[in-house]
Amino acid sequence: MAEYFLRFTLGQRILHGFLMAGFLGLVATGMPLRYADAPWAVWIAHALGGFRAMGIFHRFFALVLTGLFLTHLGQITHRAWVRRESGLFWGPNSIVPQPRDLREFYETIRWFFGRGSRPIFGRFTYWEKFDYWAVFWGMAIIGTSGYLLWFHSLFSRIFPGWIFNIAFLFHSDEALLAAGFIFTIHFFNSHLRPEKFPMDLVIFTGRVTAEELKRERPAEYAALAESGGLDALRAEPPEPWVWNVSRVIGTLGVAIGLLLFFLIVYAVLTGEGK
Amino acid sequence: MSGHQVAVSLRVFLFLFALFFLVPSADAAPLAKEICLSCHGVPGLEKTRDGKTVSLHVDGETFNRSVHGALGCATCHGDVTRIPHASELKRVDCSACHAAPAKDFVDSVHGKAYQKHLPDARGCSGCHGMHDILPVKNPDSRVYPLNLPRTCGNCHGDSELAKRHNIPVTNAYQLYMDSIHGRALTKSGLLVAANCSSCHGAHRILPALDPESSVNRRNVPATCGQCHAGVLKIFADSVHGAAAKAGNANAPVCNHCHTSHQIRRVEMESWKLDIVQECGSCHAESLRTYRDTFHGQVTALGFTRVARCSDCHGSHDILPASDPASSVSKEKIAVTCRKCHPSASASFAKYDPHADPRSKSRNPALYYFARFMTWLVGGVFVFFGVHTALWFGRTIIEKKRRGPNGTQRREGPGAPWSSAPNGEKRDG
C-alpha cells in the first residue's frame, strides 16, 4: 500500500468544487451574450428559457463565486490573524510570488531547451501561483464590473453612465481571458500534459503519494522530512468511491470546459471576430 | 373530331343555312342577341386559331347578368352586321365607351406590352373578363376589392412569367397574401384593406422606376398616406421624410423599412428583430456598435424585451440627435432612457449605447481600456501558449529518451489517472 500525504484540506477541495461549478455556469450563461451571433448561443439562450432566465442563472452562479471568494478571504484572515500561521504570505509554502519563482521559471525554460534539469520545486510552482492569482485578479475585475452592471441604477447615482461601457468591456474581455486560460493553459498544466494525462485528481482526493510528492515537489518533501512535519500530513489512501466520484466530477469539468472553449473558438472563427 | 363536335357543327351549319333564308340581310337594325346566341350559346363551340383551340361559346345567362347584358352583342362586335359573319372579327375596342380608362391603359406597363402583342399581355379582358363583366361593386366581379388580388395573381403569382418579362418581384401575389394587407383583405374581408390597385392604381399602372408611378420612391409616401394619413404627417417632418422630399436618393421611404408586398404587423417578434438589421443596412456603423452592447446582443439572440433602434430613436418621427426635439438629443435622452430604466438620471444617460472601443475621439477612456485588455489577453495567451508548447515538446523528448520501459505505472487501486510516466524525474 502506497504512502499518502495530505496536500489539500477538505475545505479547499470543496471550495475548488464550487469554483468549478460556478465558473462553468458563468461561462455557459455569459458567453452566449458575447457571441450572440453564433447559432449555439441562440440555442443555449432559448434552451435556458430566454435571456432573462439566462441572466438569473448567471447571477446565481455569480453569487456562488462571490460567496466562495469571501469564504476564502475569511479563511486566509483566520489563518493569518487568528491561528497566526507563519509563512502564509512569504516563504517556501506561501502562494505569494517571490524571487525563487523567477529562478525556477528561468530553470524551467532552460529545461525546455535541454540546457539543464528541472528545478527543485516547492509546495507551489510558479505556474500554479499564476493560476491562483489569475483567478484572484479575475474575480476582482469580473466581480466588480459584474456588480456594477447588475446594480446599474444604484451605481449610476455615484458614477457617470460611461462607467458601464467600461465595466461591460472589462467584464466581457476578462471573462474571455479567464475562460480561455482555464480551458487551455490550466487544463494542460494541471491535467492534460503527458505526465498527468488525462487528469490529476489531487484537487478532488486531496492526497498525493509519497513518490509523487518527492518527484514533483522535492523541496517541499525535503523540508517536511527535515522538520518532521511529514507525519502530521500522513493520510489514508483515498477510498475507491472517492476515486470514482473524483473521476466523474473531473471528467465532467474538463469536458464541459473544452466544449465551451471549442464553441468560443467556433464563434470567433465564423463570426466577425471580436 | 368527336361525334359530339360533329353533331354540334352539323346543327350549326343547318341553323346558319336556315337563317340565310329566314333573316333578311338588312343593314338596318343590329342583330338580336338571340340570333347570335343561337350559335354561340351552344356549349363546345370552338375553332382553331394559330394552332390553338379557341372557345367561341358565350353563356347566354351569364351574359344577360353582366353589366353589358342589355347592350346586346353588336355594340361591342360592331363588325358583325350580317350572318354569316367574317371568320375573324376585329378585336373588341372598349375605348369606344370607356375612353378615359382606355387612354390610361395605353400608357401603362400592361398597355405597352399589349401593343407589342406579347403573348402574355392581356387587354381589358385580362382583368375584367369578357361576356361576364360585372360592376366593380358586385362581390362576384373579378375586380371587386376582395377578388382583385387573385385576379392580379393569375399573372403576378407566376415566377416564370415574371422572369420572362424582367419583373423584379417574382411572387408578389404570395408575398401580398401573407402581408398585413393581404390578411386583412382575405381573412378579415376588410374592404378598406389595401389591395393591388390601392397602391399601383388600376388602368395606369407604371413601373416603379417611372417618376410618374404611384409606387415610385418619390410618390410612395403620398400613396401610403392615402390611408396612413397620420403617419404621413409625422414622417414628413422626420429626418428621413425631409431628406426624401428633398430628393435624396438614399433617404428611405415607407417601403424601404416596411417592404412593399410583405408588410408585417409591427408587433410581430420576427419584424421587431428584422427591422434592426434593416436600419443597419444603411446605418452599418451604428448597427455594429449596437451589437457590441447588451441591447444589441440580446436582440441578436432573438429576444425583443430590450431597446431596439426605434425604442430610442423613434420610428416615423426620427430626428437627428442635434435637433433638440429629437428623442436622443442631449435635452431629452434621459427621458428616453426612463422608458425602460425608470430611475435613469442625467448621469445614467451618459452611458453610450453605441460606444466604440475603436474610436479614440468618441470614447477615449474606453479606447485605452480596450487597448489594455487586448494586450493583456493577447500577452497572456502568447506567453503561456509558447510556454505550453515548449513544455509539451520537452516531455515528449524526455519520454522518447527513456524508451518504452522507462515508464513505470504506479501502484494501487486508484492512482492510475494521476500516475505519471517518470518523465519528470530529475536527471540527477
Image (cartoon, coloured by chain):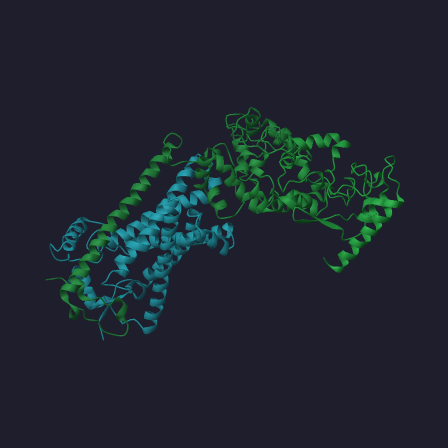
Chain colours: A cyan, B green
Say if A222 sits above or below B323 in the image. Answer: below
Q: Residue B258: where, in percent of width, then height?
A: 58, 39
Say if B53 sits above or below A224 in the image. Answer: above
Q: Residue B1: where, in percent of width, then height?
A: 72, 57
Q: Residue B214: where, in percent of width, then height?
A: 63, 31
- Residue visible at 18% across and 58% down in the picture: B394
- Closest to the observer, B385 or B342: B385
- Closest to the observer, B226 or A224: B226
Residue B280 in the figure: left or right of residue B231: left
- Residue visible at 25% across and 50% down in the picture: B384
How many numbered circles are shown? 0
Residue A43 in the figure: left or right of residue B172: left
The residue sitting at the top extreme is B246
- Residue visible at 55% across and 29% down in the picture: B240
Q: Quadrant of residue A185?
A: bottom left
Picture quarter with the C terminus of chain B: bottom left
- Closest to the observer, B299 or A4: B299
- Residue visible at 37% across and 42% down in the picture: A170
Would you say residue A265 is visible in this rendering? Answer: yes
Q: Residue B121: where, in percent of width, then height?
A: 64, 40
The residue sitting at the bottom extreme is A1
Would you say residue A87 is visible in this rendering? Answer: no
Residue B358 in the figure: left or right of residue A5: right
Residue B261 in the figure: left or right of residue B358: right
- Closest to the observer, B178 or A122: B178
